[in-house]
Image: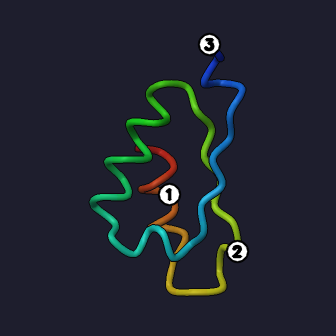
Amino acid sequence: MDFEPALLELEVTESMVQNLNESITILGELRSQGMKISIDDFGTGYSSLSISERVIHR
């Protein structure tokens, strides 16, 4: 089955980025293929805007 990665959006929870370096690498690879990433429940745990910015804009 063929599909366009740009049509997909991966929703991850804030706790997924607890291992920040690994998360940045994996999410960056997915974004480079065109997939959209969103963070669910942001602000309910330990994340800050600076951390989310590193994950999203990598």
Mark 3 or mark 1: whose residue is earlier in sequence: 3
**Residue position marked by numbered label 2 in the rendering:** 41
Q: Is residue 32 above or below residue 4?
A: below
Q: In front: mark 3 or mark 1? A: 3
Kindly identify which numbered label has been placed on residue 37.
none
Q: In front: mark 2 or mark 3? A: 3
Give how far across and how far down residue 14 sits, in percent: 56, 72
21 displayed left or right of 45? left
Dot 3: element = loop
Along the line of sight, the residue nearer the viewer: 12 or 52: 12
**Residue position marked by numbered label 1 in the rendering:** 53
Label 2 amino acid? Answer: Asp
Along the line of sight, the residue nearer the viewer: 49 or 31: 31
Mark pair 1, 2: CA separation: 15 Å
Label 1 amino acid? Answer: Glu
Mark 2 or mark 3: whose residue is earlier in sequence: 3
Give how far across and how far down residue 45 sits, in percent: 57, 87
Label 3 amino acid? Answer: Asp
Give how far across and how far down residue 17 sits, in percent: 44, 68
Along the line of sight, the residue nearer the viewer: 1 or 47: 1
Mark pair 3, 1: CA separation: 31 Å
Q: Is residue 32 above or below residue 38?
A: above
Give how far across and how far down residue 34 sits, in percent: 55, 25
Kindly identify which numbered label has been placed on residue 2.
3
Report if the CB atoms under discs 1 and 2 are less than 8 Å apart: no
Callout 1: few (<14), some (14-19), or many (20+) C-alpha neighbours within 10 Å?
few
Dot 1: element = helix
Report if the CB atoms under discs 3 and 1 are less than 8 Å apart: no
Mark pair 2, 3: CA separation: 31 Å
Mark 1 or mark 2: whose residue is earlier in sequence: 2
User: Residue at (66%, 54%) from the top-left corner?
Assistant: 11
